Amino acid sequence: MTFAVQAAETTPMHVPNPVQRPSFQPRGAVSKAAAAQALRLGGLTPMTTADYPGELAATLFCQGCPWRCAYCHNAHLVDAADEPALDWSEAREFLVRRRGLLDAVVFSGGEPTAQSALPAAIAELRELGYKIGLHTGGPYPRRLAEVLPLVDWVGLDIKALPSDYSLVTGVPGSGENAWDSLALAVESGIALEVRTTPLPGLDSPAYLEHLMQELAAVGVSRYALQQCRPHSLLEAELRERLPTQLAIPDAMPFAHFELRAI
C-alpha cells in the first residue's frame, strides 16, 4: 500500500496524445456542435495539476446538481437555472488555443452528468486531442454508463454508506444511485479514484473503516479521504462542526491511499 499526503506539484507541459475511444453521435438530426453548445458552464480553471492525477489540465465546472450536500463548497453551481458564466463556444475556443500546453480537460461541477449535452462536449474535446477526466457523485448511473466509454479517468465521490446517503445529500434513494455508479465505474476498468469527504457525524474511525472495507470489497484500489473545506459551504452553520483534522482508521485496505488535508 502506498500512503500519500497531497502536496503541491508541478507537471511538465507536453502535447497530449489522442486516446482511441468510441465516437459519440448525437441522437436525431442534431449536430455534435449544436448538442455541445447547450452545456451550461459555471466557470473554468485554465490550468491545474490537482484535478486529474499526473496530467496538466483545464477544468470546466458544469452547472446543476440534484443533491444538496450541506458541505458543498461549490454551492454557486447547484442551481442549473442560474446564468452561465461562459458559453460552450468560449470554453472550446480557449481550449483550441491551449492545445500543446495542456494534456487534459476535466468536467467537474456541480454534477456534469446532470446535463444531456455532456457526451457531445466530451466528444468535441476528444477530437482536439485532449484526455478527458470526469468528476462525479454518481447520481445518474444510466447517464454515467453512456459517458464512461468517452473518458479516460474518473474521480467518483462516495459520500457515505448507502443507508446514510440521504443524511448527506438530502435526497432519499441517493445512496443506491451512487453505489450503482461505483459498480459501473469499477466494472468498466477505467482509471478510477474514489474520494470521500466525511460529513460531521459520519466521520468516526469506526464508521470510516466500515466504509473503506465496503469500498474495497467492490474493487476500489485507489482512495482519497478529504477534509471538508470550511469556506463557501451550502449550509454555513456547518462550519462550527467541522473537525480540525480527520481520524484515519488503522486498517487501510487500498493499494493506494491519500489523505487530503486543508
Image: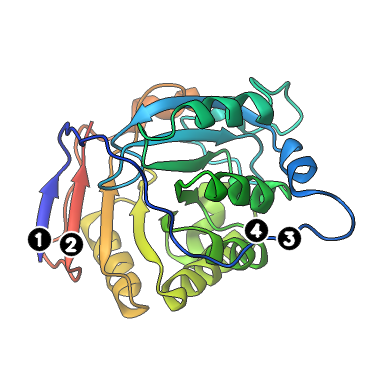
The image shows residue 113 at horizontal and vertical percentages of 63, 51
The residue lying at 27 percent from left, 73 percent from top is 213
From the image, tell me which residue sits under label 4: 172
Q: Give the distance between the C-alpha atoms of the residues marked 1 and 3, in whole angstroms.
A: 40 Å
Location of residue 63 (image quadrant): top right
Q: Please tell me which of labels 1 and 4 falls first in the chain.
A: 1
Q: Secondary structure at mark 1?
A: strand
Q: Give the distance between the C-alpha atoms of the residues marked 3 and 4, in whole angstroms.
A: 34 Å
Task: Examine the rendered structure and indicate whether residue 68 appears above or below residue 152.
Answer: above
From the image, tell me which residue sits under label 2: 256
Q: Please tell me which of labels 1 and 3 falls first in the chain.
A: 1
Residue sitting nearer the eye, 128 or 4: 128
Q: How many marks?
A: 4
Image quarter (top left, top right, bottom left or bottom right) of the N terminus: bottom left
The residue lying at 30 percent from left, 37 percent from top is 50
Residue type indicated by callout 4: Pro
Q: Are marks 2 and 1 in contact (CB under 8 Å)?
A: yes
The image shows residue 75 at horizontal and vertical percentages of 55, 28
Q: Is residue 234 visible?
A: no
The residue lying at 57 percent from left, 68 percent from top is 176
Query: Is the residue marked by circle 3 packed among few (<14), some (14-19), or many (20+) residues within 10 Å?
Result: some
Task: Examine the rendered structure and indicate whether residue 227 appears above or below residue 214.
Answer: above
Q: Are marks 2 and 4 in contact (CB under 8 Å)?
A: no
Query: Is the residue marked by circle 4 packed among few (<14), some (14-19), or many (20+) residues within 10 Å?
Result: few
Q: Secondary structure at mark 2?
A: strand
Residue sitting nearer the eye, 121 or 138: 121
From the image, tell me which residue sits under label 1: 2
From the image, tell me which residue sits under label 3: 25
